């Protein structure tokens, strides 16, 4: 019941199209067609053979090429949907609520729907990963189900095939032969690097069988590639972080435990158009300023073994290095790239303590906006005491000055100025270009003199331990492609009947022109009967091929 | 034939299980864990050591046997400002019952932090994470974030956003040693 027995006596598994042994057509469809379907050598796909348990059913589902192609199509459509609006990683918001608000505010109802459907984080959504995983399962199962029977069939193929198999091959010849036809054919085919086997009155010549494994090698490469992508999700394999660091700051490097980085100086150099660069003068006049170099001078520190986060006293200098575009700092598998910058954030402000009437100065003080002092001593016993410091002053709340952020974008100072003339002290609140005297008019004020600026570097911290795996996967993929594309699996079957007639059939998986060229050489040498390309003939007759 | 079938079923089951397992593992890592990356409730709280305004060193593991209420904050953070007096009041109640507060400031200057604490008469220890390494170790994003560490040193809760006084009381109760 389960198996098909051929006339030759060989028992074939259910679903076989061409007898594994003699090549006779086993199905009605095959018997009625003029040419045999040589795909997978007419073997039964393994999954069609068994269909019993739930495991078998799942297996069969993934074995189908239709299912595989459907998964690919769904993945393509989904991946395309993810590119309609920016993904959440690229929007300027970082909490769930602000991300949701960003999509609604920026893209209106489209954005709201997009966010609702989860497309804002599509590529790391569970269903997208599950689809990619199903594609991997499909690749493995569909390949196994086709590779194993094909491999066995080619390994066990016999020299002698039934005439019905041979006459249904695309390249076919029949006609009288001589006594030495077989020997001469064998000799010439061997010269053409064919592997030749003979059996009684028959001959099988074969070349480039490994070309048939191309698609499966190719799939192995894809699977390795997907494994690499999967590993990226596992902590420790893949790091892609942004680090904004101001000149003078030392910061722990995100996702790189134990290391910290100090930004000594950030510099943006532009072409001056002078000296050696004079030859660029014309171009610079046309386009304006052109950047020449973005550079962050850093010091890399490593905390000693066994030290804890927060212990910054005993950091060891590992390296001093100028990070420039495309010249990242490399250490311990990590690379730090120059990516972005901001120029001119306030760093220090210098004021003069002046008499408002006489404009006489009692001296200057410089306030470090990043690390201010509590009080500043001036000459003649004058002091300026800092009562409050608001780096990004945003207004008053219940009479209290507020700061919107820790960055000195709009510094505000509440100061008490004590001079020999005003020993009880005068209070004033100073912001940029504005002084408030909360307790009435003062004699003295702080007059702004100048400010120092500092720059900010935007760095990217990268680590990708999966690159060798991705590279290997890609290489194997390409080997598989080359194997399947640039090599052909060519076979000739030859039989001489008792009456001396020659039956000849030829098959290749691609490049029929090449096969015929080989056959022409053999025919000329061994005087074989003229062959016909039966597919070309049927096409000429206007019969559509199935 | 029967053993062949058995082998086939075994092979198919094994291959499917391995692949489904790999997918589940990927989804777990990529989707579920991403929310809090390295830090999760139930994890051992990463140890750290920071210095407070008086120059005293506070190491988290030194408080083993006590509950620790680790609060990350900044002077510009409005909810932090609102919850500080409430935290301070409850600190007075619970400090003798074995609950410690560590308020970790994110990389601000000594002056700003001292001024802020003195103005508000805060009595719990305030430490400054100068290079943001503790913030990095705890993967802190929004401020305020509070991490509750039980007497065994395990994280029992991660709270982002403002807390009411009742919240603070219930959290203190949660990590109070028996």
Image: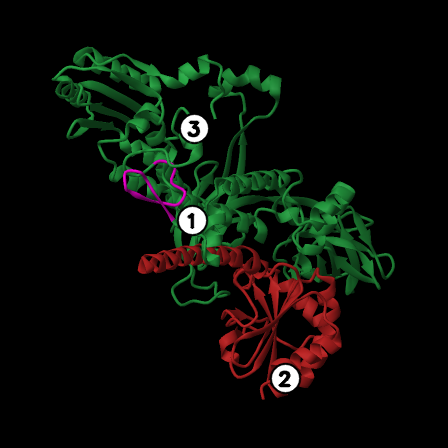
Chain colours: A green, B red
Chain letter of disc 1?
A
Q: Position of residue B154 (x, y in %)?
A: 53, 75
Above/below status of A347 relative to B80: above
Residue in front for this viewpoint, B83 or A71? A71
Callout 1 secondary element: helix
Query: Which is in the foreground here, disc 1 or disc 2?
Result: 1
The secondary structure that dominates the magenta segment is loop
Chain letter of disc 2?
B
Q: Position of residue A432 (x, y in %)?
A: 75, 47
Residue corresponding to mark 2: B95
- Classify 10 Å Cα crowding around label 2: few (below 14), some (14-19), many (20 and above): some
Residues at circles 3 and 2 in contact by the CB criterion of under 8 Å: no
Callout 3 secondary element: helix
Chain letter of disc 3?
A
Residue A227, numbered circle: 1
Residue in front for this viewpoint, A129 or A145? A145
> Which residues are the magenta region?
A3-18
């Amino acid at each position: 019941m389960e198996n098909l027995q051929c006339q030759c006596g060989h028992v074939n598994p259910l679903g076989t199209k061409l007898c594994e042994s003699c090549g006779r057509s086993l199905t009605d469809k095959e018997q009625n067609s003029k040419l045999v379907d040589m795909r997978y050598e007419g073997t039964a796909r393994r999954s069609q053979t068994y269909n019993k348990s739930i495991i078998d059913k799942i297996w069969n589902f993934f074995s189908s090429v239709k299912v595989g192609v459907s998964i690919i199509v769904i993945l393509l459509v989904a991946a395309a949907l993810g590119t309609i609006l920016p993904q959440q990683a690229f929007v300027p918001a970082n909490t769930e609520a602000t991300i949701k608000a960003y999509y609604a505010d920026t893209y209106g109802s489209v954005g709201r729907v997009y966010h609702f459907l989860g497309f804002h984080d599509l590529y790391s959504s569970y269903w997208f990963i599950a689809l990619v995983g199903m594609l991997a399962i499909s690749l493995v199962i569909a390949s196994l189900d086709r590779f194993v029977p094909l491999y066995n069939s080619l390994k066990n193929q016999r020299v002698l095939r039934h005439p019905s198999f041979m006459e249904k091959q695309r390249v076919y010849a029949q006609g009288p032969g001589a006594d030495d036809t077989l020997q001469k054919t064998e000799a010439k085919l061997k010269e053409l690097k064919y592997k030749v086997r003979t059996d009684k009155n028959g001959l099988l010549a074969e070349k480039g069988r490994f070309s048939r494994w191309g698609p499966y090698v190719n799939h192995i490469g894809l699977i390795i590639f997907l494994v690499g992508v999967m590993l990226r999700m596992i902590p420790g394999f893949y790091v892609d972080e942004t680090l904004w660091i101001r000149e003078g700051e030392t910061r722990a490097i995100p996702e790189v435990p134990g290391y910290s980085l100090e930004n000594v100086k950030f510099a943006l150099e532009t072409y001056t158009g002078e000296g050696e660069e004079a030859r660029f003068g014309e171009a610079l006049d046309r386009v304006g300023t052109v950047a020449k170099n973005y550079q962050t001078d850093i010091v890399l520190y490593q905390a000693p073994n066994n030290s804890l986060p927060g212990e910054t006293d005993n950091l060891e200098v590992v390296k001093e290095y100028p990070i420039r575009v495309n010249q990242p700092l490399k250490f311990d598998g990590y690379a730090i790239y120059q990516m972005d910058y901001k120029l001119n954030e306030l760093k220090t402000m210098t004021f003069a303590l002046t008499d408002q009437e006489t404009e006489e100065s009692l001296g200057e003080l410089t306030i470090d906006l990043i690390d201010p002092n509590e009080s500043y001593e001036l000459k003649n016993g004058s002091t300026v005491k800092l009562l409050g410091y608001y780096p990004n002053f945003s207004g008053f709340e219940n009479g209290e000055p507020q700061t919107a952020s820790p960055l000195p974008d709009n510094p505000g100072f509440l100061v008490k100025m004590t001079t020999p003339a005003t020993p009880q002290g005068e209070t004033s609140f100073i912001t940029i270009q504005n002084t408030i005297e909360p307790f009435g008019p003062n004699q003295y004020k702080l007059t702004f003199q100048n400010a120092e600026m500092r720059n900010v570097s935007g760095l990217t911290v990268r680590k990708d331990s999966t690159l060798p795996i991705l590279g290997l996967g890609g290489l194997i993929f390409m080997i598989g492609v080359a194997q399947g594309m640039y090599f052909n699996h060519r076979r000739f079957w030859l039989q001489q009947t008792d009456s001396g007639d020659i039956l000849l059939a030829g098959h290749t998986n691609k490049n029929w022109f090449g096969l015929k060229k080989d056959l022409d050489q053999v025919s000329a040498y061994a005087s074989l009967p003229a062959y016909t390309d039966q597919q070309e003939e049927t096409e000429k007759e206007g019969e559509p091929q199935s | 034939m029967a053993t062949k079938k058995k082998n086939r079923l075994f092979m198919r089951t094994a291959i499917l299980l391995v692949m489904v397992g790999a997918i589940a593992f990927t989804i777990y890592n990529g989707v579920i864990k991403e929310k809090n990356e390295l830090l999760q409730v139930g994890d051992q709280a990463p140890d750290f050591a920071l210095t407070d305004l008086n120059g005293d060193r506070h190491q988290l593991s030194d408080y083993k046997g006590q509950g620790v209420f680790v609060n990350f904050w900044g002077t510009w953070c409005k909810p932090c400002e609102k919850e500080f007096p409430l935290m301070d009041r409850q600190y007075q109640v619970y400090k003798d019952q074995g609950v410690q507060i560590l308020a970790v400031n994110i990389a601000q200057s000594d002056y700003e932090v001292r001024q802020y604490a003195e103005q508000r008469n805060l009595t719990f220890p305030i430490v400054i994470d100068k290079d943001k390494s503790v913030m990095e170790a705890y993967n802190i994003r929004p401020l305020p974030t509070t991490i509750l560490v039980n007497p065994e040193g395990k994280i029992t809760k991660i709270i982002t956003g403002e807390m009411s006084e009742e919240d603070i009381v219930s959290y203190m109760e949660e990590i109070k040693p028996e």
